[in-house]
Image: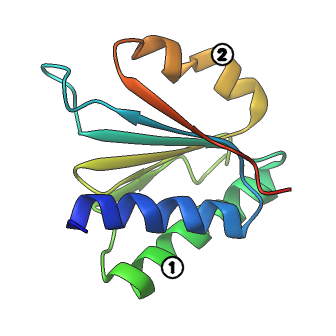
């Protein structure tokens, strides 16, 4: 499995570990001028769950894939956290922010893969 696919899988697993919901992987590889190749988008129900998912992604990916993020933004208010791994950016949203920014619609040309919730 190539590094990017492995990283996508580890990010997905780390979100599921903390019960993140509505996981969507947006494949941006066919879109010119996109800022990365993939978005991983999920929802946490509260700021504390957004924080837990963020920590889970950061720690799990470092341990399981040996990769650290280039940057993490949004940790002050925990409403929308973006974790930048270069080719992949993980987005952890509160429900209201996810509905408002609607990244899936914004990148409508992307191939979207919806991951079923575990419970």
> Can you say whether 95 is above or below 80 in the image?
above
Secondary structure of residue under mark 2: helix
Name the residue beneath numbered marker 2: 100
Q: How are the colours assigned in the image?
A: rainbow
Using a 10 Å C-alpha cutoff, classify the residue at mark 2 as few (fewer than 14 neighbours), some (14 to 19) or many (20 or more).
few
- The residue lying furthest to the front in this view is 1
State left or right for residue 40 relative to residue 109. Answer: right
- The residue lying furthest to the bottom in this view is 63
Which label is found at residue 5? Answer: none
Query: Toward which corner of the image does residue 94 lie, by quadrant?
Result: top right
State left or right for residue 74 relative to residue 69. Answer: right
Query: Toward which corner of the image does residue 2 lie, by quadrant?
Result: bottom left
113 or 64: which is nearer to us? Answer: 113
Q: Position of residue 110 (x, y in %)?
A: 35, 21
Q: Position of residue 105 (x, y in %)?
A: 51, 12
- Sequence-wise, the earlier of marks 2 and 1 is 1
Secondary structure of residue under mark 1: helix
State left or right for residue 118 relative to residue 89. Answer: right
> Can you say whether 50 is above or below 3 in the image?
above
State left or right for residue 45 relative to residue 17. Answer: right
47 or 13: which is nearer to us? Answer: 13
Using a 10 Å C-alpha cutoff, classify the residue at mark 1 as few (fewer than 14 neighbours), some (14 to 19) or many (20 or more).
some
Residue at screen point 31% across, 59% down: 5
Query: Toward which corner of the image does residue 33 lie, by quadrant?
Result: top left
The N terminus lies in quadrant? bottom left
Residue at screen point 51% across, 78% down: 60
> Can you say whether 9 is above or below 40 in the image?
below
Name the residue beneath numbered marker 1: 59
- Tell me how far mark 2 sits from mark 1, CA to CA: 28 Å
Q: Position of residue 50 (x, y in %)?
A: 70, 53
Q: Position of residue 24 (x, y in %)?
A: 55, 37
Residue at screen point 78% across, 50% down: 47
């Amino acid at each position: 499995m190539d590094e990017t696919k492995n990283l996508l899988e580890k990010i997905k697993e780390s979100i599921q570990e903390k019960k993140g919901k509505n996981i969507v992987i947006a494949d941006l590889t066919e879109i010119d001028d996109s800022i990365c190749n993939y978005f991983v988008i999920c929802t946490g129900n509260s700021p504390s769950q957004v924080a837990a998912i963020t920590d889970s992604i950061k720690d799990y990916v470092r341990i399981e894939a040996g990769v650290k993020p280039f940057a993490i933004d949004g940790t002050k208010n925990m409403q929308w956290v973006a974790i930048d791994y270069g080719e992949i950016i993980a987005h952890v949203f509160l429900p209201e922010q996810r509905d408002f920014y609607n990244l899936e619609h914004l990148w409508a040309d992307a191939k979207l893969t919806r991951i079923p919730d575990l419970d």
